[in-house]
Image: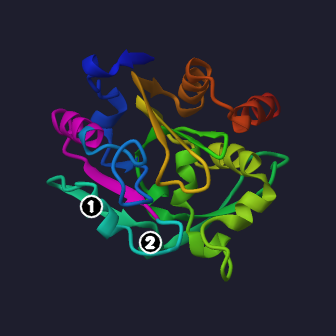
Amino acid sequence: MVFDASEFVFEVPPEISRARRVLIKPCATYPVPYPVTTSQHMLSVIVESIRQVSDADIILLDGTPDGGPVNPVYQALGYNFPRVLTLDVKDCIWVEVDNPLPKPLAVPTFWVPNVILSSDYLITVAPVKILGGRGSLSLMNLLSVLPSAKYGRGELRGWQDLYNLGIDRVIADLYFTLPFDLGIVEARQKFTSGEDPTRGEVEDWGKIFIGEPYQVDCEAAAALGLKTGYLDLIEEARVEFDG
């Protein structure tokens, strides 16, 4: 579904009212405000709406490309919500999870924080970014739940090992391995950057997309004219997976 940003109200999915733990994955890899990262306003709307129907534990989870602490980033972005636990990927216990695809596209197993597996409802909330010509939406946002220490070596910080495998294939694999329940694309603005992911051009759009992560990325990519190769790969893999 797509909403005008000025009229957006987060309608809490009924599954959340039965959940004991809700995990929210914002885009919080840099201490730079929206549209580089998920806005404090958007997270506030989500958290307050959940609290109206549920006393579930609410967790924010993210990690940084260089493996540095993410809590200073949370603080810089104003992610200070009452009764919300903020977690750092690097401080979590990591477990190896099998990719359920019969023929993985790039990665047969992923190291992921165990808190994801123990959560009842998973939400990914991302701004619209075009980085080096590649669209980044709710599914690309999942990359930073993977511990960068496992996927980068020496001076190659971040998730360079995964980029070397073909990041579109990796994101497609991750979609099937970590089935997030809800994707929210915060398209009030569109951010376009070249080499520096914290600096670029900003264009107003005034929209919010919300739904199942694959579907919401398809809708947002079509509306915004974004190049997102992982969506085609997911569509192809789903035929075999569902069959």
| Range drawn in magenta | 42-63
Dividing the picture into quadrants, the one containing residue 187 is: top left
Secondary element type, mark 2:
loop
Identified at 14% across, 54% down, the residue is: 82
Identified at 37% across, 17% down, the residue is: 3
Q: Nearer the viewer, residue 227 or 213?
A: 227
Is residue 4 rendered to the left or right of residue 104? left
Return the x and y of residue 177 as percentages of the image width and height. Answer: 64, 49
Q: Give the residue at mark 2.
A: 92
Q: Residues within 10 Å of mark 2 (few under 14, many from 20)?
A: some
Query: In the displayed structure, would residue 100 be above or below residue 10?
Result: below
Return the x and y of residue 182 as percentages of the image width and height. Answer: 46, 34
Q: Nearer the viewer, residue 243 or 228?
A: 228
Identified at 47% across, 54% down, the residue is: 198
Q: Earlier in the sequence, mark 1 or mark 2?
A: 1
Q: Give the residue at mark 1.
A: 76
Is residue 171 rendered to the left or right of residue 136? right
Magenta highlight on residue 64? no
What distance separates the C-alpha of mark 1 from that of mark 2? 21 Å
Is residue 207 shown to the viewer in this render? no
Is residue 219 rendered to the left or right of residue 80? right
